[in-house]
Image: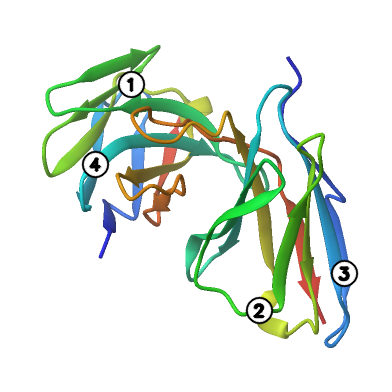
Amino acid sequence: EDQVTQSPEALRLQEGESSSLNCSYTVSGLRGLFWYRQDPGKGPEFLFTLYSAGEEKEKERLKATLTKKESFLHITAPKPEDSATYLCAVQAWTGANNLFFGTGTRLTVIP
Amino acid sequence: KAGVTQTPRYLIKTRGQQVTLSCSPISGHRSVSWYQQTPGQGLQFLFEYFSETQRNKGNFPGRFSGRQFSNSRSEMNVSTLELGDSALYLCASSLGLAGTFTDTQYFGPGTRLTVL
């Protein structure tokens, strides 16, 4: 059965204090791994798609990496506006397009 | 390009009633997926529609149903509402590519349903 586990559940950082969020996954053939950002009361905002082990993608202070078992979202010198819940999801080679989500990491960046 | 829109944004219903939620996808997107988000269960897949046909379905009771129109707009219906149906209902649209390509889904703002 497909499974996605995110850690930690919550993370508090001082502004400028870099850290990483983890997403461990078990899927019957990874078609894609997705990172989304969700602000309270809003829908998830797409950040990255990763397809294969060794792939990396960057956007501003965020960098996503992928191995065969997990993905990391590295946040460099975060700012208060980076505070949000970060969601990881996988899409499998089952013929279906649905995403299987982890429960997210709630990030708070303190000024 | 306009994003995914959902209406209404907020709804309050009582147990036993039914509700219909609407989703308009990004122009050119033919696939619409629906998800339920609750604090305890996170985001869970309900169903996907592509070209007016349900292509995939999650593990939810038959009280949850949907449909898609020829312009790709989609509606979701929940009948005989229960307290546990209170949630944020999210719609996501994508090109609907199957097979070799990863299909990125873009989410709407959601409809917050409260069942009293």
Rendering quarter of residue B109: top right
Is the C-beta separation of discs 1 and 3 under 8 Å? no
The type of residue carrying mark 4 is Leu
Rendering quarter of residue A47: top left
**Is A83 left or right of A100, judged from the image as shown?**
right
Residue B56 place in picture, x, y as percent: 52, 56
Against A56, is A91 above or below?
below
Using the rendered image, report if marks 2 and 4 lie on a common chain.
no
Residue B78 place in picture, x, y as percent: 77, 72
CA distance separating discs 2 and 3 = 21 Å
The type of residue carrying mark 1 is Gly
**Is B92 left or right of A66, judged from the image as shown?**
right
Looking at the image, is mark 1 or mark 3 nearer the viewer? 3
- Mark 3 element type: strand
What residue did someone put label 4 on?
A30
CA distance separating discs 2 and 4 = 29 Å
CA distance separating discs 4 and 3 = 39 Å
Q: Work out whether residue B98 or residue A39 is closer to the camera in this orientation and state it.
A: B98
What residue did someone put label 3 on?
B12
**Is A3 left or right of B96, judged from the image as shown?**
left
Q: Chain of mark 2?
A: B
Label disc, if present, on residue B57 of the rendered structure:
none
What residue did someone put label 2 on?
B62
Is the C-beta separation of discs 1 and 4 under 8 Å? no
Q: Chain of mark 1?
A: A
The type of residue carrying mark 2 is Gly
Sort mark 1 into few (<14), some (14-19) or many (20+) by Cα contacts within 10 Å.
some
What residue did someone put label 1 on?
A16
- Mark 2 element type: loop
- Mark 4 element type: strand
The type of residue carrying mark 3 is Ile
Using the rendered image, report if marks 1 and 4 lie on a common chain.
yes
